[in-house]
Amino acid sequence: MGPNGSGKSTLVNVISGILTAESGSVRIDGEDVTRASAGHIARAGVSRSFQTVRLFRSLTVRDNIAAVVRGSDSPVDEVALQLMDRLRIGHLADARAGELAYGLQRRVEVARALATGPRYLLLDEPAAGLNDVETDELQQIIRDSTSPEEFGCGVLVIDHDMHMITALCDKLHVLASGRTIAEGQPAQVRENPEVITAYLGTKRH
């Protein structure tokens, strides 16, 4: 997390292979992927969503998800339907993605990211543009993603909404002006003077 312009999306673009790091390294389960392509990193188990929804707008919800299903012995349509049911959008299977309300498009994008069977799921401001009810529903879906009974993948959520992030995450990593200013459990981070300054512009007395 971090204020606007702190480098959150840039960092995720580097991790997912869209941008190349100028220094440092990126490793997935010990494998150095610093110079690897985005495709290689995806095949290594990293999937992501974007700040701006990137669906195939003219395709149905089912086809959007089926197009990226990977790592399953079941028919792709069957996997897509299972994912839609889990994310509570099964009733929209035949709807065109571009005609859905924005909050539902966000949910389809998360379903599509999960369809690749990732070990690590990176979500870049997944609740951007959602109302409070939609945000709460999406938070529950994200929590379910980490459950061994569901998807069992690690989840990295990027956002600048302190309330959502502290309610959702077990550990926070805070950026400001391209550098780490705090990391740890939510209660610790909320009281960090640098975090307070970054968000409020002044230290709390």
Image (cartoon, rainbow, N blue to C red):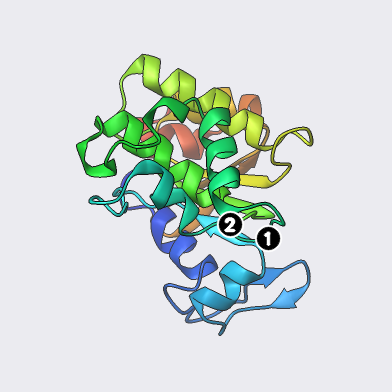
Across and down, in percent, residue 139 comes to 52, 26
Q: Camera-side residue: 28 or 106?
A: 106
At horizontal 29% and vertical 49% (from top left) the residue drawn is 52
Label 2, label 1: how far apart the Cα atoms are:
7 Å
- Crowd band around label 2 with a 10 angstrom C-alpha radius: few (<14), some (14–19), many (20+): many
Q: Camera-side residue: 150 or 49?
A: 150
Residue 169: numbered disc: none
Q: Quadrant of the C terminus?
A: top left
Query: Sequence order check: which comes first, mark 2 or mark 1?
Result: 1
Do the residues under discs 2 and 1 have CB atoms within 8 angstroms?
Answer: yes
At horizontal 23% and vertical 51% (from top left) the residue drawn is 58
Q: Is residue 189 visible?
A: no
Across and down, in percent, residue 89 comes to 44, 28
Q: Is residue 103 left or right of residue 176?
A: left
Q: Camera-side residue: 150 or 189?
A: 150
At horizontal 33% and vertical 45% (from top left) the residue drawn is 60
Residue 152 found in image quarter: top right
Residue 72 found in image quarter: bottom right
Identified by mark 2, the residue type is Thr
Across and down, in percent, residue 148 comes to 79, 36
- Provide the secondary structure element on which disc 1 rests: loop
- Provide the secondary structure element on which disc 2 rests: loop
Q: Is residue 152 left or right of residue 105?
A: right
In this rendering, is residue 35 above or below 163? below
- Crowd band around label 1 with a 10 angstrom C-alpha radius: few (<14), some (14–19), many (20+): few
Residue beneath label 2, please?
116
Residue beneath label 1, please?
71
Which residue sits furthest bottom? 35
In this rendering, is residue 94 above or below 118? above
Identified by mark 1, the residue type is Gly
